[in-house]
């Protein structure tokens, strides 16, 4: 499939797909006239790239991770340490976000004022 079709099937822009290729994460074939040709397996690869980007990983690390994939799911032992380090970093980020949310909850609880009272004067009959 050509780049426009891959874009349509993955939701990634053509520009993003070219960037993924530039970073070595995608390696399309080429037609004799120079058009990029992608395979169906590139759809899954783009999904992996988008997931890893959304998790805050950079393209250089994503390239390393994708190089670790063999047959679509088998991780090579050389990559394990790097992936574990990245997992620890993400876990730390999650822990920090949880602490921040707790602090915000405390601040919101402390800033709740007294319930509003009816300030109108009672009528005298």
Image: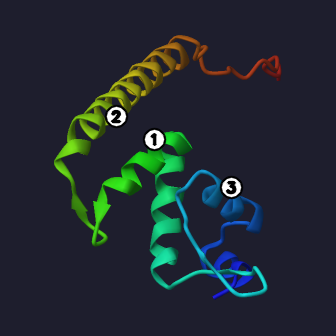
Identify the residue shown where x is 68% and y is 55%.
19
Image-based side of 69 in relation to 29, left or right: left
Q: What residue would you read off at disc 1? A: 61
The mark that comes first in sequence, 2 or 1, is: 1
Q: Are marks 2 and 1 in contact (CB under 8 Å)?
A: yes
Q: In whole angstroms, how far apart are the C-alphas of marks 2 and 1?
A: 9 Å
Q: Position of residue 2 (x, y in %)?
A: 69, 84
Q: Is residue 57 visible?
A: no
User: Mark 3 packing: few (<14 Cα in 10 Å), some, or many (20+)?
Assistant: some
Q: Position of residue 27 (x, y in %)?
A: 55, 68
In the displayed structure, would residue 53 be above or below residue 28? above
Identify the residue shown where x is 53% and y is 67%.
46
Q: Position of residue 97 (x, y in %)?
A: 44, 26
Q: Quadrant of residue 116?
A: top right
Q: In whole angstroms, how far apart are the C-alphas of marks 3 and 1?
A: 14 Å
Q: What residue would you read off at disc 3? A: 19
Identify the residue shown where x is 45% and y is 73%.
44
Q: Quadrant of residue 87?
A: top left
Asked whether 110 or 52 is in front, the reply is: 52
Q: What residue would you read off at disc 2? A: 86
Q: Which mark is residue 78?
A: none
Identify the residue shown where x is 22% and y is 35%.
81
Q: Secondary structure at mark 3?
A: helix
Q: Quadrant of residue 12?
A: bottom right
User: Mark 2 packing: few (<14 Cα in 10 Å), some, or many (20+)?
Assistant: some
The mark that comes first in sequence, 3 or 1, is: 3
Count every numbered label the image shows and give the total: 3
Q: Secondary structure at mark 1?
A: helix
Nearer to us: label 2 or label 1? 1
């Amino acid at each position: 499939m050509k780049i426009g079709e891959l874009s349509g099937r993955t939701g990634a822009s053509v520009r993003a797909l070219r960037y993924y290729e530039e970073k070595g994460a995608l390696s399309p074939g080429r037609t004799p006239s120079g058009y990029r040709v992608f395979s169906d397996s590139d759809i899954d690869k783009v999904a992996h790239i988008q997931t890893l980007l959304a998790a805050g990983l950079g393209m250089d690390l994503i390239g390393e991770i994708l190089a670790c994939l063999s047959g679509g799911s088998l991780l090579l032992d050389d990559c394990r340490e790097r992936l574990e380090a990245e997992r620890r970093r993400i876990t730390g980020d999650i822990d920090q976000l949880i602490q921040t949310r707790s602090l915000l909850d405390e601040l919101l609880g402390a800033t709740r004022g007294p319930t509003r009272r009816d300030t109108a004067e009672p009528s005298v009959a």
